[in-house]
Amino acid sequence: MKWKVISVILFVVFIGAAGWGYTYYQTKQVDESLQTADTEQLATILERPLVNVQAEWMEKAVEQYDVPSVLVLYEHGGVLTDKQWIYLADLMTFEEFERMVKAGAPLDVSIPSSTLLEGLYSLNDEPEKWRLAHERIDVAFLNTHPNILIQAVYDGNTEAFTDLIERMDTEIVPYEEVAPVVMEMNQQLMLEAMVKKGYQPE
């Protein structure tokens, strides 16, 4: 009986040690993949049994501006903070952004200083990104974040501004906040879009 107990204990210890060794080895391989930005190897490792994405892996990929690795980690269960997602969305190509959205990344994201949408309106960015976001985002989010409209004005993105104001509920459009900025920036086409929506200039 004594030897049976000892055998069971030794077996459990062996399994535990083997599991720890396996996990340690996989973690080392992930670290190497992130160091070399080898997304193919990273994806292969994450498909293996008992390998779960760790928060520090995502943190490292974000710190290295490694968008492809972030995508792979996210698709395998990794988590981004709202701040990280807003930051990365601005850096991504349309193809990368679309892939993130298809993987379940939310669009109605905001932090005290910004929203995800506001980072997409630069005329130097690919317009397909904000177009995709506008198509999929809940109008209720637009209605409660008038600063999105104002950012489109500052970025000089008439197309985005017009599309936004057309999607928003008429009674929600914050004309008192937006109109002075539109006038100041001398955005005639934006003013026309506001008038079409129901704004009456004084």
Image: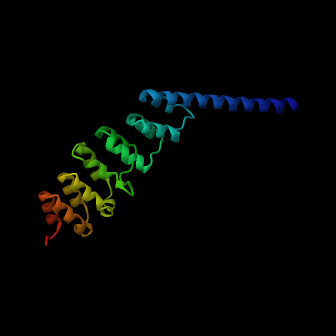
| Residue 158 visible in the snapshot | yes
The answer to whether residue 89 is above or below residue 21 is below
Near-viewer residue (31 or 40)? 31
Residue at 63% in and 28% down: 21
Q: Position of residue 129 (x, y in %)?
A: 27, 45
Residue farthest to the bottom, as pictured? 202
Residue 17 sits above or below residue 167 on the image: above
Please give the count of numbered marks on the rendered protein.
0
Residue drawn at (37%, 46%) of the image: 87
Question: Residue 39 lies in what quarter of the image?
Answer: top left
* Side of 168 where 81 appears, left or right: right
Q: Position of residue 187 (x, y in %)?
A: 14, 57
Q: Nearer the viewer, residue 58 or 71?
A: 58
From this view, report whether residue 195 is shown above or below residue 49: below
Is residue 104 visible in the rendered structure shown here? no
- Measuring 32% from the left and 40% from the top, which residue is drawn there? 92
Q: On the rendered image, what quadrant is the C terminus found in?
A: bottom left
Choose top left, top right, bottom left or bottom right for residue 167. bottom left
**For this view, does 59 lie left or right of residue 85?**
right
In this rendering, position of residue 93 left or right of residue 78 = left
Give the x, y percent position of residue 46: 50, 33
Where the N terminus falls, by quadrant?
top right
Q: Position of residue 86 (x, y in %)?
A: 37, 48
Check the image and tell me how it is coloured.
rainbow
Pick the front one: 169 or 56: 56
Give the residue furthest to the front: 184
